[in-house]
């Protein structure tokens, strides 16, 4: 693998594939792409996004029409801080398979980070259209509403996200923030406490709980 960029190595592998015939060629390519994809996944999960990006690119050379590889390349690029490249990879993945809610969610996140809030919102809504039961699409759409000062609009999105994934602790904390901004302090306290059930060590959550208890005059 370390010599994958070496021209002689590439020529040898190409010749080996040719000698197998077209039927075996496809099977071998699929196995190589799978192995490289697993290796890249491992590199990304162990905090080496640069190596993961390089490895996903090698896998894509072998299987250029695999949408999963392009999606995971985008994730690694985002992890490496390569937002523009990540957007291009997500878009390529979606051009190969439009029915990918998580690809749409991650495209939205990348667009939002690049300053395109309108594009991000469209992407989250498209994710919901593809899969109305994807909690992260509702959660991130709620964030769009909250960031533009529409807490009332954010609330039903966060409520939907947490109903679909009751262990989404961050969703409860953001829901509590939205409730508090609308003056619904008791609901905010309930939401914070639900979040702390799943993430009891969350310092911001504990601080929010104490402040809400003080505001409500409860222990």
Image: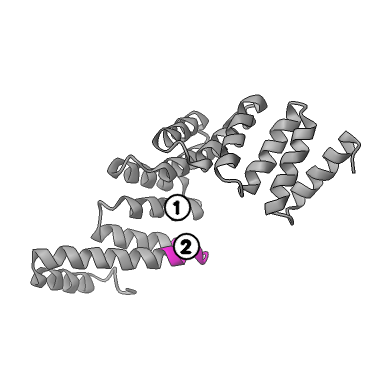
The residue that label 2 is drawn on is 44
Residue 84 in sight here: no
Residue 192 in sight here: yes
Segment tinted magenta in the rendering: 41-50
Q: Quick one: 182 or 119, which is closer to the camera?
A: 182
* 63 horizontally vs 2: left or right: left
Residues marked 2 and 1 touching at CB (< 8 Å): yes
Asked whether residue 105 is drawn in magenta, I would say no
**Marker disc for residue 27:** none
Asked whether residue 45 is drawn in magenta, I would say yes
Q: Quadrant of residue 145?
A: top right
Q: Is disc 2 surrounded by few (<14), some (14 to 19) or many (20+) residues within 10 Å?
A: many
**Would you say the magenta stretch is mainly helix, strand or loop?**
helix
Give how far across and how far down residue 110 sits, in percent: 48, 42
Q: Quick one: 192 or 20, which is closer to the camera?
A: 192
For label 2, the SS is: helix
Count of numbered circles in the view: 2
Give how far across and how far down residue 79 sits, in percent: 50, 54
* 186 horizontally vs 48: left or right: right
For label 1, the SS is: helix
At x 14%, y 73%, the residue is 16
At x 72%, y 31%, the residue is 179
């Amino acid at each position: 693998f370390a010599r994958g960029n070496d021209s002689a190595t590439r020529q040898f592998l190409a010749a080996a594939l040719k000698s197998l015939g077209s039927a075996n060629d496809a099977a071998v390519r699929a196995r190589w792409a799978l192995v490289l994809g697993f290796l890249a996944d491992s590199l990304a999960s162990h905090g080496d996004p640069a190596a993961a990006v390089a490895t996903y690119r090698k896998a894509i050379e072998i299987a250029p029409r695999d949408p999963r590889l392009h999606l995971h390349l985008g994730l690694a690029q985002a992890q490496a801080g390569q937002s523009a490249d990540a957007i291009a990879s997500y878009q390529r993945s979606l051009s190969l398979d439009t029915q990918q809610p998580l690809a749409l969610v991650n495209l939205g996140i990348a667009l939002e980070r690049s300053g395109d809030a309108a594009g991000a919102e469209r992407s989250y809504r498209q994710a919901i259209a593809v899969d109305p039961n994807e909690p992260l699409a509702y959660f991130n759409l709620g964030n769009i509403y909250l960031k533009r000062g529409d807490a009332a609009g954010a609330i039903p999105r966060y409520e939907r996200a947490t109903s679909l994934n009751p262990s989404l602790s961050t969703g409860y904390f953001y829901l509590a923030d939205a409730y508090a901004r609308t003056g619904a302090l008791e609901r905010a306290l309930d939401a914070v406490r639900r979040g702390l059930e799943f993430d009891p060590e969350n310092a911001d959550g504990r601080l929010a709980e104490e402040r809400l208890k003080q505001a409500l005059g409860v222990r």
